[in-house]
Amino acid sequence: MTGAPDGPVTERASTGFTRAYGSRPDGLWAAPGRVNLIGEHTDYNDGFVLPFALPRRTVVAAAPHSGRRWTVWSEQAGEQVSFGRAQAAEPGRVGGWAAYVAGVVWALYEAGHDVPVARLAIASDVPLGAGLSSSAALEAAVLTALLDLAELDVPVADRPGLAQRAENGYVGMPCGIMDQSASIRCRPDHALFLDCRTLEVEQVPFDLGACGLAVLVVDSHAPHRHVGGEYAARRTACESAAAALGVPALRDVGTDQLDAALGRLDDPVVRRRVRHVVTENQRVRETVELLRAGRLAEIGPLLTASHRSMRDDFEITVPEVDTAVEAAMSAGAYGARMTGGGFGGCVLALVDRAAAEPVASAVAKAYAERGFRAPTSFTATPGAGARRLS
């Protein structure tokens, strides 16, 4: 298994700020990536999700600036970008990774908040393009920093919506609110049960260590792209199905109504999409019930069923992630599934803590046999949401 990049990410952000601007930052703010334990493509269908925060995080070092342009340095991109109010006011004017930063400024202005001009330096150990929500971690860390610098008392419950608006309205990615909610609202040793319609949350105990368990995260290194394309197509199919069924969203179709609903849809592809969303919402509920009862190992079959549904009904897996799931299960995992929006990214496997290394080795062996690029793996402990570090 592999660890995070060399050197603490907090130190890299702080040092990067000093090198970029010749002074020390006023503070450090962090927000985590996330693993979605179960509940995929249910968020934009007003359904239920169950993510938890990773110990890996994006850190922003920041300080207010007297100039008229925001300046951002990124360790991962290896570049510095600056933009003014006019560019931040018009979605699409700032592109690439810096669009997520400009999008937060835009969302705050759109919400009526005065945003201070600032200098920022960003470092992260959340893998890019792995389905672990590196974009939400960036948005949440920048948002938390700017709110503190401006001394704006925005309730924590309202912050995910601002970060989501940055990604939807400025970047142009039609994501639901799960990723931003997880990055901002998660707690250590808990999973976040989120109702994506009401935005009500429940912190569900998920203390893996106390049960001798671990979640092994396997980065498939298969390409992972969301903006436009297939993700948007899945969302459009779900929304059109809800309209055809006369319901506000697919969340309003229960499993007891599923057969009748499918019978009213002519397109077999749309029927498969609907079946995934409806059954996935039920799997989330069942997983939460087991976690409330402290029966953590028993969620394994639900995880595996979720993967089969994503593979066969939602059709968002790729050979690399299917191979990782199959290898993990053969090596003794309680359950395994792809996590994230699909078409690449990561797989999570629920395993005995002592089995994490052997399961990771089994996945790596299966990859080698199929000629895939070698995966990387790490164990994930539920961590804290966005916060100020210093």
Image: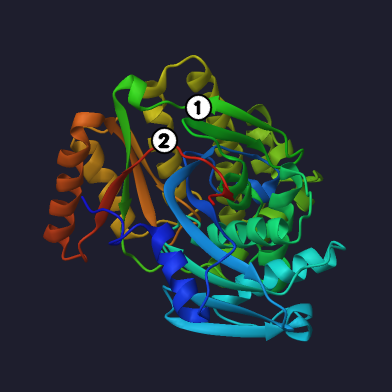
Label 1: which residue?
287
Pointer 2 with pointer 1, Cβ within 8 A: yes
Label 2: element kind: helix
Whether residue 271 sits left or right of residue 315 in the image: it is right
Residue 321 place in picture, x, y as percent: 33, 54
Q: Amino acid at mark 1?
A: Thr
Q: Quadrant of residue 5?
A: bottom left
| Residue 126 shows up from this direction | no
Up-down relation of residue 63 to residue 35 (above or below):
below
Residue 65 — which label? none
Question: Tag 1: Cα neighbours inside 10 Å, few (<14), some, or many (≥20)?
Answer: many
Label 1: element kind: helix
Residue 247 place in picture, x, y as percent: 80, 43
* Residue for point 21% across, 44% down: 327
Up-down relation of residue 291 to residue 310 (above or below):
above
Ranked by sequence position, the earlier of labels 2 and 1 is: 1
Residue 303 — which label? 2
